[in-house]
Image: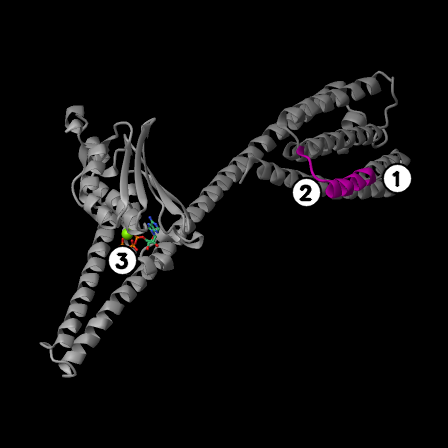
Amino acid sequence: MSEKQFRMILAIEAFDRLKWFARLRWLAVAGLAIASVIGPRFGFEPVWPSLFVVAGCVAAYNVVFVILFRSIQRTGLSLVNLRAYAILQMMLDLAALLVSVHFTGGIQSPFLFFFTFHMAIGTIMIATRVMFVLAGVTCLGVFGMSVLEGRGIIPFHPFTQGAVLSGEMQLLIFIVFAVSVFGIVYLTHSVASRVKERNIELHGTTQELSERTAELQRLLDEKDELERRKSHYMRISAHQLRSPLGTIKTSLQVLLDGFLEPGSEGGLRMLEGAAERVDDLLAIVNDLLELAKMREGRARAPWVQHVYLNQVLADIFDALEPFASGHNVELVADIDGVAMLDWGVPPDLVYAFENLIHNAIKYSTSGGKVEVRLRVREGISLIEVTDNGIGIPEELQDEVFLEFVRAPNAKQHAREGTGLGLSIVREGVMMHGGTITLESREGEGTQFTVMVPLHYVPPEVEQIVGEHSDPALAET
Ligand code: ATP
Ligand code: MG
């Protein structure tokens, strides 16, 4: 939950309390009005009409507040404004109570201890330090009123006839009153702050819980996605294996049923065809095994230090030169800089770049040109493999990295192919901390861009280095 949402909740809570306080005030108005009317019957003469007037005033400002609250509800809540209203209400209530106390016996008034009630409610709604100030002002008000009444500066209204307490007694009442007023603010504050702490703790726990739930949900979604991809992958793999198997089965059946003699010309051709399909199957199975190994995070060979990418590319060039000239494709190297990887698995790097360059030659037309460029900048080796061959249709450019995806123009151009090459290339690049992207236009050519960081430390090596804190060991 954000700070803004939390403040909004606080504002709503404060607003609810203010509304509740306004409702409670109607009870006070009714109480004052009833007391003023029936008081004289019980011998409390001064309550009429003074308390009735106070009740009218309280009712009047309560109406104003109720109207104000409605407009606040419509225009939006602000915590600062609500606090100001709470303080204003409290001050008006204390003033009304002081006037009621004055008309009902001053320091001897039975209404005097209603102040403590107000102090408790105020401490729940208003900052405690403000309430301590209001408690002080209240005590001063009550003290000042009784002094003025005692000196005859303002009239004294005894609650019952003839009942005037001695000065000491009045002082004692005042001291008890002051202690009660401050004490109630302190007590209410300590109880309310403990409740508030609990609320915050609870809020924190709830927030943590909801974060954990979200994390769990994310992991579950990830797991679902993995399951889905796994089953998709298995389905495609099975499908890819099924078609050559079907062809082999048909060929063998023809021979077994005696339609063709195995030694005859037709029989031999059929067996050759079946053997070719077996080669296809072997190629698929080998690639699948390769991919599975990389996916499991197992390199084909151990990680070695200081892998010289220039040498890797030079070896691939030597190996692929005959393949290129066989296709009448010019193979050009544009090497600038020295790309030395801190850590690498040479056979996997060879496999990755060999596949890329092999593809570029394979999907070039006779007379085409394949260019391999190497650049090194800011700790990154950049390898671009560019051809002016058949290109990749736009709608398949993201998908060619997935298993078994072959574009129709590629199938037409070269029948054989599993569609697993680029998946293995991508795994190989990624396990070296690199990235691979492509740009292509159908009929014009393709460019694959590989970026491999020079100082990548694979997790396997990191673990070993971590286990041996001796830097000399980490170097080996
Ligand atoms: P194999 O698994 O035997 O390599 P493949 O070459 O068809 O078969 P990938 O290497 O994975 O499989 O390539 C996937 C597809 O990407 C190809 O079938 C082709 O459609 C497209 N492709 C890859 N490289 C190129 C390229 N240089 N030019 C045009 N198309 C390409
Ligand atoms: Mg390929």
Residue 69: quadrant of the picture: top right
Q: Can residue 456 be spotted in the picture?
A: yes
Q: Mark 2 or mark 1, which is nearer to you?
A: 2
Q: Residue at x 60, y 36 (%)?
A: 7
Which corner quadrant holds the C terminus?
Answer: top left
Pointer 1 residue:
40
Distance between the alpha carbons at the discs numbered 3 and 2 = 72 Å
Q: Is mark 3 within 8 Å of ligand 1?
A: yes
- The answer to whether residue 435 is above or below residue 338 is below
Pointer 2 residue:
16
Q: Residues within 10 Å of mark 1 (few under 14, many from 20)?
A: some
Residue 155: quadrant of the picture: top right
Q: Mark 1 or mark 3, which is nearer to you?
A: 3
Q: Secondary structure at mark 2?
A: helix
Marks 3/2 in contact by CB < 8 Å: the verdict is no
Query: Relative to residue 260, is residue 61 drawn left or right?
Result: right
Q: Mark 3 or mark 2, which is nearer to you?
A: 3
Nearer-N-terminus badge (1/3): 1
Type of the residue with mark 3? Gly
